[in-house]
Amino acid sequence: MGLALAEAALDAGHDLVVVSGPVEVKYPPTIRVIEVVSTEDMLTQCQRFFHTCDGMIGVAAPCDYRPVRVEPHKITKTGHPLELRLIETEDIVAMLGASKRMDQWVVGFALETEDLRLRALAKLEKKHCDLMVLNGTEAMNAVTNAVEIIDPQGSVIANFSGPKGEVARGIFGVIQKRLIA
């Protein structure tokens, strides 16, 4: 979905900076791609570029949790259970949404499995988003997607389904009309 949205924005004549984790996606050469490995690296790079941008689309979630401690070497089997402790990572969209200027916009994505609209609306508010795109788990690693776009009043303002390229053009059309124009 990230590639499809980047191509839709590029086709609409916009300059882009894509901050991406390790994915098997080839972006067009005219798009500036900043590759990162961790959620912390992604946050740093997003903060580095966000102040120069008109807006941000948080298409895919990076890891929500990370290990409390990372071992520098292989963990050898001991025959005993291993306890893994995780802590939450920073919420990149929420942090950028909270720091946006009056002339900037933020669009988030909510991938939910239950109470879909309620959770998407809660995310929209918590993350200071101007729009939230709701989709389900069937979108992951698929060539198609089905989404709803929710505004800050909780109204579903658009629905799109089909190949991800078509869905992305629909989403970006709403962004263009409601947030950019």
Image: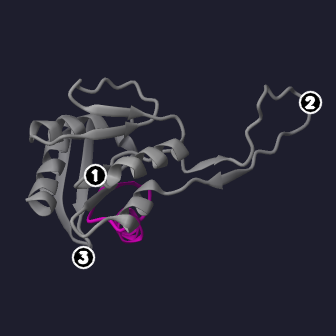
What residue is drawn where x is 25% and y is 61%?
105
Give above or below for 153 relative to 101: below
Cα–Cα span, label 2 and label 1: 51 Å
For image coordinates 92% across by 30% down, the residue present is 78
Nearer to us in this view, 32 or 68: 32
The mark that comes first in sequence, 3 or 1, is: 1
Residue 39 magenta: no
Q: Position of residue 27 (x, y in %)?
A: 28, 27
Judging by the rendered image, the residue that carries numbered circle 3 is 153
Q: Is residue 5 left or right of residue 81?
A: left
At label 2, the amino acid type is Thr
Tell me if mark 1 has few (under 14), some (14-19) or many (20+) residues whose alpha carbon lies within 10 angstroms of its own. Answer: few
Residue at left offset 44%, top offset 61%: 95
Please provide percent x and percent y for residue 107.
28, 57
Q: Which residues are magenta?
A: 109-133
Give the structural element (helix, strand or loop) at label 1: loop
Query: Which sits in the foreground, 85 or 100?
Result: 100
Disc 2, disc 1: CB below 8 Å?
no
Q: CA distance from mark 3 to mark 1?
A: 28 Å
> Is residue 135 at least partly visible in the picture?
no
Distance Cα–Cα, label 3 vs label 2: 55 Å
* Residue under numbered circle 2: 78
Residue 131 drawn above or below residue 28: below
The numbered mark, 2 or 1, whose residue comes first in the sequence reads 1
Give, as a three-letter code, the residue at label 3: Gln
Q: Is residue 131 above or below residue 23?
A: below
Q: Please state, as top left, top right, bottom left or bottom right, where the N terminus lies in the image.
A: top left
Determine whether, in the image, residue 95 is placed left or right of residue 156.
right
**Secondary structure of residue under mark 2:** loop
